[in-house]
Every structure is written in C-alpha cells, then in structure tokens.
Image (cartoon, grey):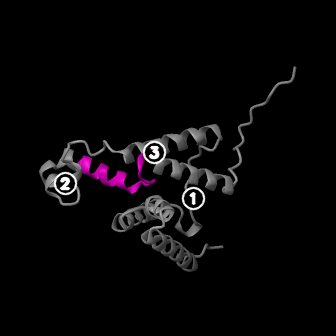
C-alpha cells in the first residue's frame, strides 16, 4: 500500500486568467441574483453608522450622511455586510487549505520596521476616504461600474492605474 503524503508547502496561486474569468462569472451571477454588483466600502460606512448609533445616537441620527442608515435601527442588516463577512471567511478558509496563512509585514524596506504599520494604516484610511468620495471602491466602482459600462467606473479605473504608476515612479525601493 502506498501512503499519500500531505504537503505543508503552500499551494500555487491560481492562473490569473482562470481567476479573472471566475471573478467575472461571480460578478454576473451577483448582478442576476441581487440586482447589484460587488463592493465593500459601503460596509465600513454602515459599521460607522452602527457604532455611532450605539455611542452617540442623537448625533448619528441627525447626521445627513449616516442618519438614513440608522432609521430602521439595524444598519448592519444589509447585503454588503454579509458579502464582506463572506469574503473574509472565504479568504481565511482558502488560505488555510492552501497552507498560506502567515503573519508578516509586507512592504518596501524604507517603509518597513516601525513605520510600516503607520504608513499602511494611513494609506488604508486615505483609500477608504477616497472610495467614499468617489461613491465606490475598487470592486464597487471599478469592477462593477466597468461591468455595466459606467463612465464613472472607467474614469476611476484609468485614474487608479495612472496614480499607481505615478506613485511607483516616486517611491523607489532602496537597494
């Protein structure tokens, strides 16, 4: 009898073409079943409304931006909350079975060390702020917006890539 050895080595990543086609199928299925695309930043806004409702309910209800989300008293009771939770749980399960769960701090050397968590947090805050101003994140505005041929979606994608290329020119890795 031959024994099958279970390897603890990380499994290879999927082929990007296959992953892209499957993502497109998920997006199409989401449009067909729910009537809207994918997104994530709406969850953080709803989470903020929920926190505000519990910490400062009068001020949150009076807020033009957050007030509409707390009218029913359940700002987290929305499709986007379950989508974000599902993505997080699915990613964790996938990483576990692919032996890719690892805690590390990625980034260029000159942004590493004690500065890295701060720069990562500030970058995330700025990206989230920009996503709320733009009325969507990379997945909500870029992926779902472009899928329905939205001018805003294509404008976002072009700007997103242009700024990324520009930032890459200014931020060089130390050697």
Based on the displayed image, in which of its 4 quarters is residue 102 positioned? top right
Q: Is residue 46 magenta?
A: yes
Which residue is most to the front? 32
Residue lying furthest top: 1
Considering the numbered disc 3 on the image, is that residue within a helix, a strand or a loop?
Answer: helix
- The numbered mark at residue 106 is 1
Q: What crowding class fits label 1: few (fewer than 14 Cα within 10 Å), some (14-19), or many (20 or more)?
A: few
- Closer to the chain start, of discs 2 and 1, is 2
> Which residue carries the number 3 mark?
33
Q: Is residue 25 magenta?
A: no
Find numbered disc 2 in the image and state the secondary structure of the residue it sits on. Answer: helix
Seen in the picture, residue 109 relative to 34 is either above or below; the reply is: below
Q: Residue at position x 46%, y 71% from top?
A: 156
Q: Disc 2 marks which residue? A: 67
How many numbered marks does the figure carry?
3
Locate residue 83: give its quadrant: top left
The residue at the point 46 percent across, 74 percent down is 155
């Amino acid at each position: 009898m031959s024994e099958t050895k279970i390897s603890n080595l990380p499994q290879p990543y999927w082929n990007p073409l296959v992953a892209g086609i499957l993502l497109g199928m998920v997006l199409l299925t989401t449009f067909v079943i729910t009537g809207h695309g994918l997104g994530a930043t709406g969850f953080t806004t709803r989470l903020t409304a929920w926190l505000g409702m519990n910490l400062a309910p009068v001020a949150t209800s009076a807020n033009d931006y957050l007030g509409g989300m707390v009218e029913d008293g359940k700002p987290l009771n929305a499709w986007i909350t379950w989508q974000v939770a599902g993505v997080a749980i699915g990613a964790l399960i996938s990483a576990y079975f692919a032996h890719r769960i690892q805690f590390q701090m990625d980034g260029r050397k000159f942004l590493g060390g004690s500065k890295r968590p701060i720069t990562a947090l500030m970058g995330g805050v700025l990206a989230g702020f920009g996503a709320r101003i733009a009325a969507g994140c990379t997945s909500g505005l870029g992926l779902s917006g472009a899928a329905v041929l939205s001018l805003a979606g294509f404008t976002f994608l072009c700007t997103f890539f242009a700024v990324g290329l520009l930032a890459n020119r200014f931020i060089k890795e130390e050697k």
